[in-house]
Amino acid sequence: MKERSTDAGASRSPFHAGEAAAQERVGVRARAEDAGRRVIRDHMPDQHRSFFEQLPLMVIGGLDARARPWAQCSPGRWGS
């Protein structure tokens, strides 16, 4: 399991510029940054991997031809 670096990566925000701008606009930038640094990881813990493997669906997302995001749940069992 990959562990988060505590030196070089520690100064980087877990949010991209667009997220940071939206947080700034609504006045929650500092609060979001504090919470994000505590809970957002650059890896998935083994217990989460195990949990997601057991779910009977897969979430699929992407951008359409006009760069609008979309998402859908695709139910089923592995291999079906």
Image (tube, rainbow, N blue to C red):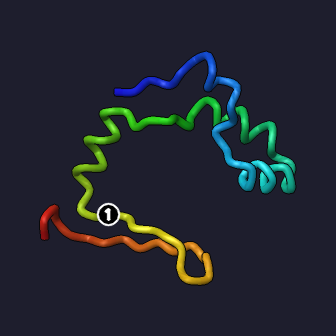
Which quadrant of the figure has residue 30? top right
| Residue 56 sits above or below residue 62 on the image | above
| Residue 78 sits above or below residue 36 on the image | below
Residue 29: x, y in percent? 80, 43
* Residue in the picture at 61% in, 16% down: 7
Residue 48: x, y in percent? 34, 40
Q: Is residue 11 left or right of residue 54?
A: right
Residue 70: x, y in percent? 51, 75
* Residue in the picture at 70% in, 25% down: 11
Residue at the top extreme, as displayed = 7
| Residue 47 sits above or below residue 67 on the image | above
Q: In this view, does 3 lie to the left or right of 36?
A: left
Helix, strand or loop at mark 1: strand
Nearer the observer, 33 or 18: 18
| Residue 45 sits above or below residue 23 on the image | above
The number of callouts visible is: 1
Residue at the left extreme, as displayed = 79
Characterize the local packing of mark 1: few (<14), some (14-19) or many (20 or more) Cα atoms within 10 angstroms. some
Which quadrant of the figure has residue 45? top left
Q: Quadrant of the N terminus?
A: top left
Q: In this view, does 30 lie to the left or right of 71?
A: right
Nearer the observer, 16 or 52: 16
For badge 1, the amino acid type reads: Met
Q: Mark 1 points at which residue?
A: 58
Q: In which quarter of the image is the C terminus?
A: bottom left
